[in-house]
């Protein structure tokens, strides 16, 4: 039920007469900075309550109705917390570092979007630090990281960039990385193994038995997991054949690896399982160059479900990875660690998306051949 004007915080402030609304000023007079005392007076609460609500520490201490009254007063008065003073008091910089491979990979651009959205809810800024070579080591972005950061969120593909930063006790949340890493305060993973199982079992169900794995040539936990899951899934199929072609994570390398797989000696694979959509796009180019049709002569699958997956023709069968959710979960885990709350390991589900680049046609042709 809506409060009456007398019962609302505006009504209480107006009724006091001698205490004019803090955001009302005489024409021509400079506006005084709105303080937590002004908000407390307007909402009819203590300054301590305002601090609890604006610092998102109110749950279990004040009612939802009181918290909403404080937020409404702060919003309508134009109040902004003095973050510098609060940070000095708490020993916080309100800054988190996100370390990812270069943002030419759209997956990590979406991870950043999710992390930044969650950070904004907590009044935290995100410093983005891509590894300049795309993957692998990068220099320490700060001369004194502990003095400028509250914590770090990092992808396993850029973990070597953290060597200098992690000399001290700076909280670290690892994304898509080995959950057994002891230096991580928390981990957020995708169920990569299940994703590879899903796509492999889907292709097996279409009748495929000759596979080539276009494996990302990157020494990273996430790609090791994909290779193991693929081998384990096919290990239980007596007539399955698997070859592996390593490739850098770009279209040209994917095309070259696919050409090697498709034009090599022995029976041609009927399905190319690629560690990423970028490699799969290269595989489709290779098939066309060799006079093969996708999926009539060879099926191709990707991993990620980037916009690229629906930009190529035929559209790619792939595994959808919720990149923004990874970034959000990573930032929330870091906030929990900083607040002294437990941050349990998180594993997010993935989803097989079947599209036009895969079918049973090549599998049937392979059986006939």
Image (cartoon, rainbow, N blue to C red):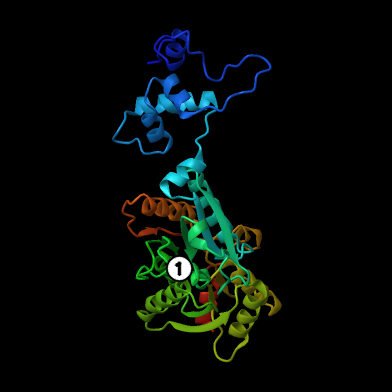
Q: Is 342 above or below relative to 290? A: above
Q: Which residue does the image show at 60% across and 77% down from the upper left?
A: 248
Q: Where is residue 141 in the image (x, y as percent from the top left)?
A: 58, 65
Read off the residue under disc 1.
Answer: 166
Label 1: element kind: helix
| Image coords of residue 190 (percent x, y) | 43, 62
Residue toward you, 31 or 62: 31
Residue 170 image offset from top left, x and y in percent: 43, 61
Q: In which quarter of the image is residue 63?
A: top left
Q: How many circles with numbers are drawn on the protein?
A: 1
Q: In which quarter of the image is the N terminus?
A: top left
- From this view, report whether residue 18 is shown above or below residue 365: above
Q: Nearer the viewer, residue 283 or 348?
A: 348
Identified at 41% across, 27% down, the residue is 68
Front one among 147 and 183: 147
Q: Quadrant of residue 293?
A: bottom right
- Say if 81 sits above or below 159 in the image: above
Which of the 4 image quadrants contains residue 310? bottom right
The residue at the point 69 percent across, 78 percent down is 291
Instruction: Note whether residue 224 is visible.
Output: yes
Image point (32%, 51%), residue name: 341
Instruction: Give the x, y percent position of residue 209.
Output: 46, 79
Q: Residue furthest left?
A: 60
Q: Residue 253 versus residue 233: which sits nearer the camera?
A: 253
Residue lying farthest to the bottom in this orientation: 265
Q: How crowded is mark 1: few (under 14 residues within 10 Å), some or many (20 or more)?
A: some
| Residue 357 visible in the shown view | no
Quarter of the rendering occupied by the C terminus: bottom right
Left or right, 281 with respect to 11, comes to right
């Amino acid at each position: 039920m809506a409060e009456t004007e007398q019962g609302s915080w505006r009504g209480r402030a107006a009724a006091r007469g001698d205490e004019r609304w803090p955001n009302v000023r005489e024409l021509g007079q400079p506006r005084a900075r709105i303080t937590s005392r002004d908000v407390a007076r307007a909402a009819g609460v203590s300054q301590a309550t305002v601090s609890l609500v604006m610092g998102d520490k109110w749950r279990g201490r004040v009612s939802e109705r009181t918290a909403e009254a404080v937020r409404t007063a702060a919003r309508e008065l134009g109040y902004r917390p003095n973050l510098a003073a609060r940070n000095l008091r708490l020993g916080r910089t309100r800054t988190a570092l996100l370390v990812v491979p270069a943002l030419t990979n759209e997956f990590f651009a979406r991870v950043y979007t999710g992390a930044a959205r969650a950070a904004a809810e907590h009044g935290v800024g995100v410093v983005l630090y891509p590894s300049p070579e795309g993957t692998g080591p990068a220099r320490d972005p700060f001369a004194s990281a502990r003095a400028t950061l509250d914590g770090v969120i990092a992808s396993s593909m850029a973990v070597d960039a953290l060597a200098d930063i992690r000399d001290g006790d700076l909280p670290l949340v690892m994304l898509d990385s080995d959950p057994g890493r002891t230096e991580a305060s928390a981990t957020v993973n995708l169920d990569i193994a299940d994703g590879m199982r899903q796509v492999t079992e889907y292709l097996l169900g279409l009748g495929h038995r000759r596979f080539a794995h276009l494996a990302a040539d990157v020494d990273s936990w996430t790609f090791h997991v994909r290779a193991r899951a693929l081998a384990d899934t096919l290990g239980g199929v007596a007539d399955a054949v698997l070859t592996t072609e390593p490739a850098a994570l770009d279209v040209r390398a994917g095309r070259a690896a696919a050409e090697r797989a498709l034009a090599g000696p022995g029976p041609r694979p009927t399905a190319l399982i690629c560690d990423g959509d970028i490699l799969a796009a290269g595989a489709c180019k290779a098939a066309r160059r060799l006079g093969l049709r996708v999926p009539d002569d060879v099926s191709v699958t990707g991993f990620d479900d980037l916009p690229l997956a629906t930009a190529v023709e035929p559209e790619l069968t792939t595994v959808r990875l919720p990149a923004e959710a990874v970034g959000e979960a990573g930032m929330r885990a870091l906030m929990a660690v900083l607040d002294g709350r437990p941050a349990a390991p998180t594993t997010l589900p993935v989803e097989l998306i079947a599209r036009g680049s895969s079918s049973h046609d090549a599998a049937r042709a392979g059986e006939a051949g």
